[in-house]
Amino acid sequence: MELKTKISAENGQHDLLITREFDLPLELLFKAHVEPEIVAQWMGTKVLKLENKKHGGWAFETSDANGNVVFRADGVFHEFVPNQKITRTFEMENAPFGVQLEFLEFEKLTEDTSKISIHTVFKSGDLRDQMLRLPFAQGLNMAHNRLQDAANKLK
């Protein structure tokens, strides 16, 4: 089965492009990226901080059933333009990938559909390729499916 979230990664490069079209109005797609309650639903994580402004920070954390932290990531917003774009850093704790730079662009396709394009830059091609060897594409597609479902409830 083909994934709805597309990932393009050219050989020898240190970046990738993620695209996904949603059956959501642009404003709702953007809201799903900036409202802590919605982000927590589709990412399946606890939102510790989400300061949606230039130089604002963000932090997410996921724990197992015993309360042990199994995932923690954070970063800083460098650009924040509502319903248009977010530029931020992304860094996972205890992971070998280092800091990534993400450029999220939100695009209105019709009154009821929209698209997100995420250009992610890694420090090296090797780090990017390590990420791609994980079930990254499947996990991101599943998260985007949950985003669609969570936002549909807000329509």
Image (cartoon, rainbow, N blue to C red):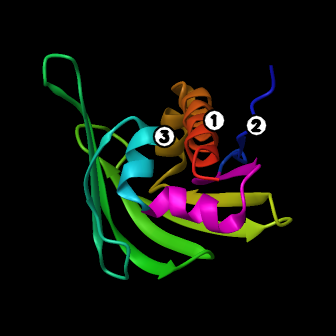
> Is 53 one of the magenta-colored residues?
no
Q: What residue type is disc 2 on? A: Lys
Residue found 62% across the figure and 59% down from its top = 29
Report how far apart the C-alphas of labels 3 and 1 lie in the structure: 8 Å
Label 1: element kind:
helix
- Comparing 51 with 9, the one in front is 51
Label 3: which secondary element: helix
Q: Give the left or right position of residue 59, taking residue 21 as reference.
A: left
Residue beneath label 2, please?
4
Could you tell me if residue 99 is visible in this image? no
Decide: few, some or many residues near mark 2? Use Cα within 10 Å; few <14, some 14-19, many ≥20.
some
> Measuring 74% from the left and 58% from the top, which residue is drawn there?
115
Around disc 3, counting alpha carbons within 10 Å, would you say few (fewer than 14), some (14 to 19), or many (20 or more)? many
Residue occupying image coordinates x 23% and y 37%: 94
Give yes or no for contact between labels 2 and 3 (Cβ–Cβ under 8 Å): no
Mark with earlier residue (3, 1) = 3
What residue is shown with label 3? 42
Q: Which residues are magenta?
A: 13-34
Judge by depth and name the residue closer to the eye, 19 or 32.
32
